[in-house]
Each structure stands twice: as C-alpha cells, then as structure tokens.
Amino acid sequence: MYRKLLPFIALGQFAAPLLPTVFGIGTSVGDAARADYNGLPPEQPIGIAFAIWGVIFSLYAAFAIFAFLRETELIRRGGPPLAIAGAVNVLWMLSAQLIAS
C-alpha cells in the first residue's frame, strides 16, 4: 500500500511550499522567523543553505518512483518509514504555512 502512496507524498513535498506563491494561501515557510533580528534570526542559515531540500525532495521522488515500479528488500524495509517521514514533513510544511497566517 505504501508503495503506491510514496509518489503522492513526493508530489506533496514539492507542492506544499508552492501554496503561498501560487494560490496565495498562508505564508511561506520561514517568513515568520525572518521577521525578527533584521530579517534573519541568528540560528537560521542564509537562504542558499535551504537549497539542500531540493536535493532531498528529488532523491525522495526518485525512491518513490523506484518503489512504485518494483518491490525489493530495500523497498520493503525502507518504504514504510520513508512514507511516514514524508507525510509528516508535508503536514509540517502545511501547518507552518497555514497556522502562521
């Protein structure tokens, strides 16, 4: 079952940050934090550091496609925890955007 959900979760990870930009719903993740300390809190790295999430989401999507196409021992063992982690990540991004607004 999780094998069929992984691609949708992967799409959710790419789509959730687009809600404020495309649909005008909520605030971008991190906007509330950037309002302090002249625009950047001391514990938050500069924007380019967040580029790693594009790599992480892309690798997650590649795993999701691989899992959808075939089942291996890696998929059987790694798929369920990755499905849970991806779904929680999507929920966190949505809550961070919608609660802040």
Image (cartoon, grey):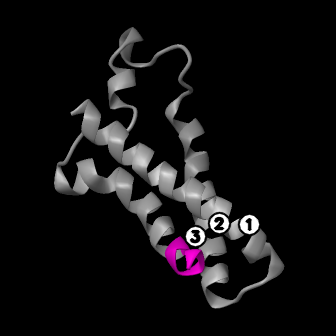
On the image, numbered disc 2 is attached to which residue?
80
Residue 28 seen by the camera: no
Please give left or right for residue 76 compared with residue 2 in the image: right
Q: Can you identify the residue that label 3 sits on?
A: 61
Q: Is residue 81 left or right of residue 29?
A: right
The earlier-in-sequence mark between 3 and 1 is: 3
In the rendered view of the protein, which quadrant contains the N terminus? bottom right
Image location of residue 101, percent across then percent down: 21, 33
Q: Relative to 97, say whether 66 is above or below.
A: below
41 is higher (above) or lower (below) than 13: above
Q: What residue span does the magenta drawing correspond to?
A: 1-6
- From the image, give the main secondary structure of the stretch colored magenta: helix
Is 30 left, or right, of 70 in this rendering? Answer: left
Q: Earlier in the sequence, mark 3 or mark 2?
A: 3
Q: Say above or below: 101 vs 84.
A: above
Q: Position of residue 41 (x, y in %)?
A: 47, 16
For mark 3, give the secondary structure: helix
Q: Are marks 2 and 1 in contact (CB under 8 Å)?
A: yes
Question: Identity of the amino acid at label 2?
Answer: Pro
Q: Mark 1 Cα within 10 Å, few/some/many (few <14, many 20+)?
A: few
Helix, strand or loop at mark 1 = helix
Residue at label 1? 78
* Extreme residue toward the top, this view: 37
Type of amino acid at the residue the image marks with label 3: Ala
